[in-house]
Image (tube, helix red, strand yellow):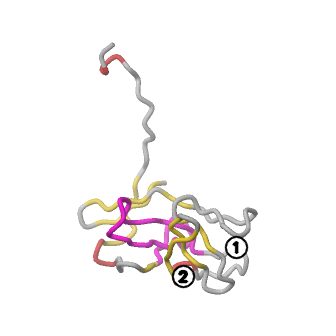
Amino acid sequence: MSLSNVAVNLPTHNWQAVCGRDDLVAQSGVVVWFEGRQVALFYLPEQDTPVFAIDNQDPKSGANVIGRGLIGHLKGELVVAAPLYKQHFSLNDGRCLEDPQHALQVWPVRITGEQVEIAR
């Protein structure tokens, strides 16, 4: 069977530019406006996936502070620590490591040329 005869179901995304590559700060978060909400972008150039997009609103406090959180590793996961209550959220899937009832939305994100884009 040739590959040309196989239907491949690849996800298609509608990408929207949210900032320039120069707006990112290595090892830190910046916040952008995307579809009516604040989204924290974390730029980790040494990672296979160098940029992560995660909801900026802390579910426990309701404050928009996740972009100010500290990045680290916990239990083998790349996480951001929320500044107020110090709970840890996975940058890959948004779940809270301490409390599974809390999670942050994550989005596909990419750097294309000089633009940072988030998928709708």
Q: Nearer the viewer, mark 2 or mark 1?
A: 2
Q: Measured from the top left, where is residue 53 in percent x and y?
A: 48, 65
Q: Is residue 3 left or right of residue 61?
A: left
Q: Which residue is mark 2?
A: 69
Which residue sits at x=50%, y=58%? 107
- Residue 52: quarter of image: bottom left
Q: In the rendered view of the protein, which quadrant contains the N terminus?
A: top left
Q: Residue furthest top?
A: 1
* Lateral position of residue 27 relative to residue 69, left or right: left
**Which residue corresponds to the image point at 58% horizontal and 78% vertical from the top-left?**
81
> Distance between the Cα atoms at labels 2 and 1?
14 Å
Q: Amino acid at mark 1?
A: Pro
Q: Horizontal and vertical percent for residue 95?
A: 64, 62
Q: Residue at x 52, y 79 (%)?
A: 67
Checking the image for residue 100, the label placed there is none
Q: Where is residue 72 drawn, in percent x and y?
A: 50, 75
The reply to whether the magenta stretch includes residue 52 is yes
Which residues are the magenta region? 31-56
Rendering quarter of residue 46:
bottom left
- Determine which residue is flagged by label 1: 59
